Image (cartoon, coloured by chain):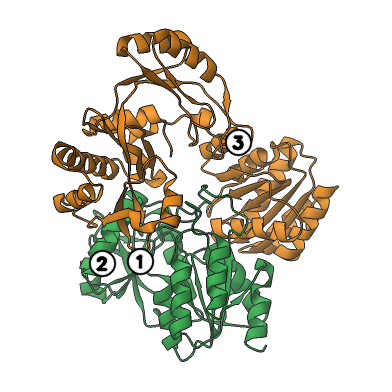
Amino acid sequence: MKIHEYQAKALLREFGVPVPRGEVATTPADAKAAAARLGGRVVVKAQVHAGGRGKAGGIKVADDAEGAERAARQILGMRLKSPQTPPGGIEVRSVLVEEASAVARELYLSITLDRARATHVVMASEAGGMDIEEVAARTPDKIIRQWAHPALGIQDFQARRLAYGLGLAGAQFKQAVALIRGLFALYLARDASLAEVNPLVVTKEGRVLALDAKLNFDDNALWRHPAIVALRDVNEEDPLDVEASKYNLNYIKLDGNVGCMVNGAGLAMATMDIVKLAGGEPANFLDVGGGASPEQIENAFRILSSDPSVKAVFINVFGGILRCDRLAAGVIAAIRNLGLRLPVVVRMEGTNVELGRQMLAESGLALTNAADMGDGAKKAVALARG
Amino acid sequence: MSILVDRSTRVVVQGITGREGAFHAARCKEYGTIIVGGVTPGKGGTTHEGFPVWNTVAEAVASEGANCALIFVPPAAAADAIMEAAAAAVPLVVCITEGIPVGDLVKAKHFLAGTSSRLIGANCPGVITPEQAKIGIMPGHIHRAGPVGVVSRSGTLTYEVVGQLTGRSIGQSTCVGIGGDPVNGTSFVDVLRLFNDDPETRAIMMIGEIGGTAEEEAAAFVKAKVKKPIVAFICGQTAPPGRRMGHAGAIIAGGKGTAAEKMKALEDAGATLVRSPADMGATMAKVIGR
């Protein structure tokens, strides 16, 4: 799960990580009032779940409260488009108004999981403010890494190594060590999957602070963090993704026209692949899961077919826990209840497949049967072309 | 022969009084697996659908000589269940549970490193040695005993490949689902090593997916050590970057973990790559001369 920068900064503050003073605003008048309270120069930053905001015109500096109001009027309501947003962009609904910092140095700091080592890794670099993947690709020696002990976490000597590696000394060194420890404590305590500060800055006054902050959280751990769940902003997500999450369906909308309904994540990915190999484009990823009930199948069908670009549906199920008769019952109910007119190709295999096939045949619905997944993909792609 | 499990494996089911645990314990027993009973804290001394229940894994080991734990415990308590099985010196721990926080798995994996236990999973279909023992949730009837070892990060896609193999009368020595989470107990390399040393496994079918570098590590191992033919398929060739494709581990992050990179690494290591998931069985048939 992703959250906004202003929410991330509030969490950082809670864990003793210094951030610039700032307030969130949803109207130009609020932005003006916030800027007046902060005093002096401010930065007005669009709050969306995507990077590349600066280049997209979503970050503006203002000299005073009136300037902040003007900047907020330009940013609020705009559809911010960056390489990280969907093609249509994301509507900006709030801005963070923050005191402007006099930046002397821009650094980079992040914490994430190192899958290969099966533990958390803290990464720091003097090349702050830049795309870290580019730094990693071009000058990998500019990134310092310290791996946390799986049970004991990051030790002080590791935080010191990182701070020395960033070329810090004196008061800034001490601030950076404390900041690294605070960020790691937050990352662990809240089950974050990514904590990224880019840039981490040293100001001309000699303060070390998190000028930007990005926090992502492990979806599997959200049950133990209701306060994090409360930060979810569904406006940032595709409405169909949100609808699917209500029914515990794994759905991701894509750009094609062949709707796919599959059980299991691996088979669902493989189904997308085979649709593409058959010359078509998948409209979505959809994993109905192992133990889907007929009701869940019906909801999956409704969500999938409510995407107007879907021209044909390909059901590919290898029944293990999910029995083919339950799948058939869900499909029949969905098509009848939704009055669905889309062509549907069904490929079923596995547990209770004979019963499932018989139920579909006796339903009187015009379904296209497929012998295997290759055959199903070809038929679905042909039907989607019309 | 086979790897990891056979008809002598004695299984204790953790979480046997839950809906999934009870259902699958019965299916495994029907298949011929020795299920000695189950563990549910607080229900020790009772029986559940004919299975004896203990409070702790250690009791099941002491009284029945359990040497494999099959875990259906809900995500919040699953890492604890894994550690309990390892502390009871159970050599093989198979965790089916999906949705365990990755931070919990990091700790559990570290805990296991100090023991003699091997973890399969989590978030996996389990392990089956056809016609001997089924320790997991896979449909048993699609399997046949034979010469092909199967290792996969996916569940239903593994059933798909097994269905294609059995459909061509190609049996399997053992099928291992290593799970779809970003941190798992047993890697591709671990299973490839076991298959490579198993005289009855003549060829290996490997199913990978996007995310992480486990397939690249497998490719390096294949190049250095594996003498048996390998057929590989990587799913997620069309997955968009930055989106988690169902499995917590299936995500292309920072331009890394793409299917194309993994396919190239495996092809360079000498594996036969399958482009279409419909051709997995046919490609294996060709490779082993059926």
The residue that mark 2 highlights is B112
Disc number placed over residue A240 in the picture, else none: 3
Amino acid carrying mark 2 in the image: Leu
* SS label for mark 2: helix
Which quadrant of the structure image shows residue B278?
bottom right
Q: Chain of mark 2?
A: B
The residue that mark 1 highlights is B185
Disc 2 to disc 3: CB gap under 8 Å: no
Q: Nearer the viewer, residue A314 or B32?
A: A314
Q: Chain of mark 3?
A: A
A324 vs A55: above or below? below
Amino acid carrying mark 3 in the image: Leu
A205 vs A216: above or below? above
Q: Nearer the viewer, residue A6 or B167?
A: A6
Q: Chain of mark 1?
A: B
- Residue ID at (52%, 32%): A55
Task: Name the quadrant of the C terminus of chain B.
Answer: bottom right
Q: For the residue carrying disc 3, how many other residues have a C-alpha within 10 Å: few (<14), some (14-19), or many (20+)? A: some
- Residue ID at (39%, 11%): A64
Disc 1 to disc 2: CB gap under 8 Å: yes
Disc number placed over residue B19 in the picture, else none: none
